[in-house]
Image (cartoon, rainbow, N blue to C red):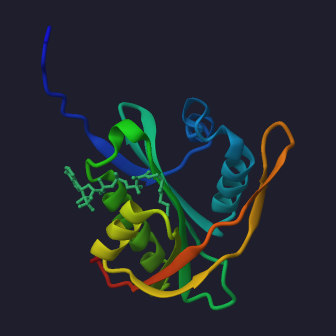
Amino acid sequence: MLQEFTLTIPVTIRPAQADDIPKLEWFGMITPFRKILEKDFAAAQAGKLVYLVAEANHFPVGQVEADLVRFQDTSVGYIMALRVLPPFQNLGIGARLMTAVEQAIFHQGILTAQLNVEKSNHLAQQLYEKLGYQMIGEETTPWSYTTPEGEVKTVNESEWIMQKSLKKGGA
Ligand SMILES: CC(C)(COP(=O)(O)OP(=O)(O)OC[C@H]1O[C@@H](n2cnc3c(N)ncnc32)[C@H](O)[C@@H]1OP(=O)(O)O)[C@@H](O)C(=O)NCCC(=O)NCCS
């Protein structure tokens, strides 16, 4: 060991800005989903979606979104695209992003949060259960995206549907 020291890094959760979007490709890791990032940011600008990032050291190291208009029933906000840059995982950022997006949904007068989690994603499922989400069903709805190279990819994962009633101030 040549040196060891501890860093304390402030993290801010705030709405995504235009210059976050290319950075949220995370050096190629998320690049196949570029068009989705851009489309979702445009939807956020139009007020249809909440798009939050966790910023550390001037870089967006985590993100989460809530679609406010996915369901005919506008009393349900649909949380999606929660992710934390791997070196920043297991530090509590994911849980805090969830609390922040729940508060943002509640602030819109929407009292229920819903999300889908892949059945194989046990860590995320555990996190959602800890945060008070309950399984209400399951579905396998194939969806597609187009990579920046124009290739269409289809995802066909079996998922749990989870739901939580929101209260003022979270929890
Ligand atoms: C799922 C994901 C978003 C979780 O983000 P995260 O920042 O690692 O989550 P948190 O740190 O808030 O919580 C994860 C664990 O860390 C623990 N933790 C919370 N605060 C902590 C802290 N200050 N220090 C250490 N650990 C902490 C939590 O209790 C939790 O522990 P658990 O394994 O017992 O549940 C992240 O793993 C990820 O990006 N995964 C890939 C994308 C993905 O699967 N997204 C979900 C799609 S549905």
> Residue at (39%, 72%) from the top-left corner?
103
Q: Residue at x 36, y 36 (%)?
A: 87
Q: Quadrant of the C terminus?
A: bottom left
State the residue at coordinates (33%, 76%).
129
Q: Which image quadrant for residue 101?
A: bottom left
**Position of 167 compared to 7: left or right?**
right
- Closer to the camera in the image, 127 or 103: 127
Query: What residue is at 63 percent from the left and 36 percent from the top?
Result: 22
State which quadrant residue 71 falls in. Answer: bottom right
Percent x, y for residue 18? 62, 42
User: Which percent across, then down, holds residue 156?
Assistant: 70, 66
Estimate the x, y position of residue 35 in percent, counting from the top left. 75, 48
Q: Residue furthest top?
A: 2
When the figure is inspected, residue 1 is found, relative to residue 33, above or below; the finding is above
Q: Quadrant of ligand 1?
A: bottom left
* Residue 156 horizontal side relative to residue 110, left or right: right
Considering only vertical position in the picture, is 164 above or below 149?
below
Residue 62 in the image: x percent, y percent?
Answer: 44, 47
In the image shown, does 35 or 129 lie closer to the viewer?
A: 129
Residue 126 seen anywhere in this rendered image of the structure? yes
Question: Relative to the observer, which residue lies in front, 24 or 50?
Answer: 24
